[in-house]
Image: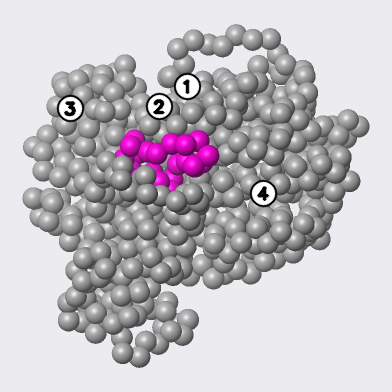
Amino acid sequence: MAASNPTGTAITSARNLGFDPDALREKYRIERDKRLREDGNDQYLEVSGDFSRYIDDPYIEEKIEREPLFDEVEVVVIGGGFGGLLAGARLRDAGVQSIRVIEKGGDFGGTWYWNRYPGAACDIESYVYLPLLEEVGYMPKRKYADGKEILWYSQEIARKYDLYKDACFQTEVTALRWDEPSERWIIETNRGDAMRARFVAMSNGPLNRPKLPGIPGMETYKGHTFHTSRWDYEYTGGSAEGGLIGLQDKRVAIIGTGATAVQCVPHVGASAKQLYVFQRTPSSIDVRADRPTDTEWAESLEPGWHQRRMDNFNVLTSGGVEEEDLVQDGWTEIIRNLLFLVRNEDEPDLSPDALLKKVELADFQKMEQIRARAEALVEDPETAESLKPFYRQFCKRPCFHDDYLPTFNRPNVTLVDTQGRGVERITEKGVVANGKEYEVDCIIFGTGFEVGTAYSRRCGYETYGRDGVSLSEKWQDGMRTLHGMHAHGFPNCFIMGSMGQSGFTANYPHALNEQSKHIAYIVDQCLQGNQHLVEATEEAESEWVDAIVQYARLNEKFLADCTPGYYNNEGKPQDRSMQNANYGLGPVAFYKLLEDWREEGQMRGLKVS
Ligand code: NDP
């Protein structure tokens, strides 16, 4: 019996699904197996040496000249993205005056500073994605903010919290060293600085190092190339809004079909003479339905609405249940479908096994809908078939776009489906896939960012704690932290982001916000009590590591069944130490745990002296 769920989406009851779950499960397995490869994460090239031009900063208008700094501040925050901004804001709120943000780019903005490709936008609702909306007093213009607005807003946070004061831009940290006698961190940079700080918060960004595919022949190509995270507008012309007139007489290849490519392909397709999109695995492309902010609704919001909305979204995207779905978009639909399935059963079986099965069914339903969308929007049946993703929705980052799929109806746009194998070779003239050479003037790498590599490599510097022991040495057999934030032997140092052992949520700034509150609380406690040192005890760290490993097992099967990608260590989740997993009970439980810890007021697991 077909019916409608509260949002009006057509949905079918469990008794009459309209698809065969066993057949789909088998199809998912076959598609995953096609993509499994021996080299896993090693298939990618580090952007260094000959490739380092891929990470030059194309946005700097003027190089900042300054003398090296040897002074001392209370807190150094590394990274000027949302993590650094939130840490700075919460520390300011806690009364910390002396804060220095160090940032590689020329301004605040982090990922939104670097990623200015045409069409760059956030597909998590702006009312939950943008942090500090009530504090800053800002209402986004649309349900989904574009990159330009997000970059402006990042800088607005910095202005509001006076974080430009003392900030060091165009500055890369090269090493962090704990100086035992003075009980200070010494921060060395590529500007010759050796500044000192009592506390350090590291917010380097989960996706800050672009990666290139290790395709044979890369170095032989004679045409133009760049990575999406350093868009070359000098070559393409136009702007983030499109109008790439420089491509009108160009044959262009885009390699990759992840969340970034999905956003820029429509613009390149609209401007280039010819566009070839090289696909290894299709993304799931759901409805976006962007719209301007309803001013009446915005004015009706009660104080505290922002945190409530973020929490609501977080619960629903982590498999929890809420009376109301405030965001109501593709991210929260699986749980809506699940509730609908349960409510339609006369005597629902709510045992954990039965629930897992229902979640899988709701997922199948969602993905059937996504596949039907590709069929409905893409005219050529073979291309439509190639664009259908066969894996669970959260195996890869889901995408939400209304122009991507129709772009393949353009006569100048060709999807090259590599059937899970990827591009074979790059030649002097172009790209080879399925044994055929495609001659192009330009190759754009939409191949993403390093995720599974060593933490210090992704940071770009090493951190040396007590007795000169580095974080890499300490973590050689897997991460060891308390709450993903503190490491024994590394006093007064806070690790931000969901790099592991922390709470991971799709809405990344939410995670950073919770961590920032926690850091600000700890720093405030230390300063109020006139305490100099705060450090995780070995015992607390061990307990946390045990908990992480124990709960990581809950997600092991899901990840192993997934198509390869950065969520499952390129199809090798078992190779990644279980210790490096995030908190397996989910972000809602993790933030609650942090909140309870603060409420307890004992600084449990930390040695304060
Ligand atoms: P991804 O890592 O998601 O995608 C990389 C793409 O490159 C994949 O399609 C991958 O295929 C493909 N690829 C890699 N090697 C080859 C090869 N040898 N041949 C052919 N294809 C290859 O990177 P993105 O930059 O797209 O996105 C990174 C993340 O940034 C997202 O997951 C998301 O978290 C974030 N993002 C968020 C946005 C937002 O709206 N908030 C917008 C854009 C990005 P395969 O899938 O087979 O590995």
Q: Contact (CB < 8 A) between labels 4 and 2? A: no
Judged by depth in the image, the label closer to the viewer, 3 or 1, is 3
Looking at the rendered structure, the kind of residue marked 3 is Ser
Q: For disc 3, does the CB lie below 8 Å from ligand 1?
A: no
Distance from label 4 to label 2 (Cα)?
A: 33 Å
Q: Earlier in the sequence, mark 4 or mark 1?
A: 1
Q: Position of residue 190 (x, y in %)?
A: 64, 20
Q: Position of residue 495 (x, y in %)?
A: 66, 44
Which quarter of the figure is the N terminus placed in? bottom left
Q: Secondary structure at mark 3?
A: helix
Left or right: residue 510 compared with residue 334 = right
Q: Which residue is mark 2?
A: 230
Looking at the rendered structure, the kind of residue marked 4 is His
Judged by depth in the image, the label closer to the viewer, 4 or 3, is 4
Q: Secondary structure at mark 4?
A: helix
Q: Earlier in the sequence, mark 2 or mark 1?
A: 1
Distance from label 3 to label 1 (Cα)?
A: 25 Å
Left or right: residue 367 compared with residue 543 = left
User: Outermost residue toward the right?
Assistant: 181
Q: Which residue is mark 4?
A: 518
